[in-house]
């Protein structure tokens, strides 16, 4: 793997729904400025937003580190939330533990993790109950 | 057809984000579950929904839709409107149901 061209760091506030999407929006802008193709930008934006919003609604926020390389964009999302008891189940389309309150805002279709899987080339979830979750995703440039 | 032309034909009320009204609209998507919209809506789409909270602007911006149409006479929340103006993604409102809006859109995009 080559040295990153650029590394970006974001703190995601776990109490404020209204700012979720800021990190993914910012990364989208950076990639556009770098002249990255629209399809790659779309994949990164979707995967990152879904992960960012999950950190807010399921895990009281966290941090995101983004590494942009000539061949790939890697996004590492870390939270210190409750962890995911059954990752395989959580990955299934339609599975959701979202509260009634966030469902009313349009979340809870249980499609966030499936979207991340679909729109990234590599995805790894490391999670420990009571400790937190790391979602590490990479989108290839070509 | 542009956003403004569609708004005119369908009799939509502009709520905010008018800077984006000249954009060309290509196709559309209907939905209120944000992660479905996120995965399916395409760049340039008209997105018909009944969600009015700020999160629709994040989804609209990241999927690059051309316009949001709120059905059932709904209005965007104040912070949604602010974000729409900032991003130049227009939000319109219609008294009609999502079904009726889409029936009219069908022949235009
Ligand atoms: N960071 C996380 N920490 C703890 N649990 C999580 C985390 N991310 C996802 N989950 C669990 O996995 C489930 C499925 O996540 P997914 O994103 O697919 O759906 P959702 O967030 O419930 O709904 P949607 O994304 O469609 O709005 C969640 O309901 C939650 O139980
Ligand atoms: Mg989710």
Image: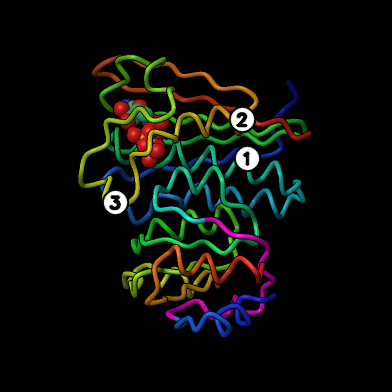
Render colour scheme: rainbow
Give the Cα distance between marks 3 and 1.
24 Å
Q: Residue A105 location in percent, x, y?
A: 30, 52
Q: Dot 3 lies on which element?
A: loop
Q: Residue B6 location in percent, x, y?
A: 60, 78
Residue A80 appears in view = no
Instruction: Identify the subunit bearing mark 1.
Output: A
User: In which quarter of the view is residue A44 placed?
Assistant: top right
Q: State yes or no: residue B24 in magenta.
A: yes
Q: Find the magenta span and give its range.
A: B15-29
User: Foreground mark, 3 or 1?
Assistant: 1
Q: Which of A44 and B2 is in front in this view?
A: B2
Residue at 70%, 31% (x, y): give it: A72
Residue ID for mark 2: A120
Q: In the rendered image of this protein, does residue B23 appear above or below residue A10?
A: below
Instruction: State if disc 2 and disc 1 touch (CB < 8 Å).
Output: yes
Q: Dot 2 lies on which element?
A: loop
User: Foreground mark, 2 or 3?
Assistant: 2
């Amino acid at each position: 793997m080559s040295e990153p061209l650029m590394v970006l760091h974001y703190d995601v506030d776990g109490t404020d729904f209204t700012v979720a999407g800021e990190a993914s929006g910012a990364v989208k802008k950076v990639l556009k400025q770098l002249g990255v193709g629209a399809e790659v930008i779309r994949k990164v934006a979707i995967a990152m937003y879904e992960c960012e919003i999950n950190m807010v609604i399921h895990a009281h926020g966290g941090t995101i580190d983004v590494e942009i390389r000539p061949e790939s964009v890697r996004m590492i999302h870390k939270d210190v939330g409750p962890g995911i008891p059954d990752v395989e189940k959580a990955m299934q389309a339609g599975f959701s533990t979202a509260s009634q309150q966030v469902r009313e805002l349009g979340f809870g279709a249980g499609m966030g993790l499936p979207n991340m899987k679909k729109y990234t080339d590599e995805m790894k979830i490391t999670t420990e109950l009571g400790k937190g979750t790391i979602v590490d995703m990479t989108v290839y440039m070509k | 057809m542009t956003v403004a032309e569609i708004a005119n034909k369908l009799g939509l009320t502009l709520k905010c984000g008018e800077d984006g009204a000249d954009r060309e609209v290509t196709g559309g998507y209907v939905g209120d579950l944000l992660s479905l919209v996120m995965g399916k809506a395409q760049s340039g789409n008209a997105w018909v929904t009944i969600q009015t909270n700020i999160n629709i602007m994040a989804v609209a911006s990241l999927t690059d839709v051309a316009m949001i149409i709120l059905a059932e006479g709904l209005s965007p929340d104040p912070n949604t409107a602010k974000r729409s103006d900032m991003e130049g993604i227009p939000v319109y409102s219609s008294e009609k149901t999502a079904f009726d809006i889409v029936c009219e859109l069908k022949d235009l995009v």
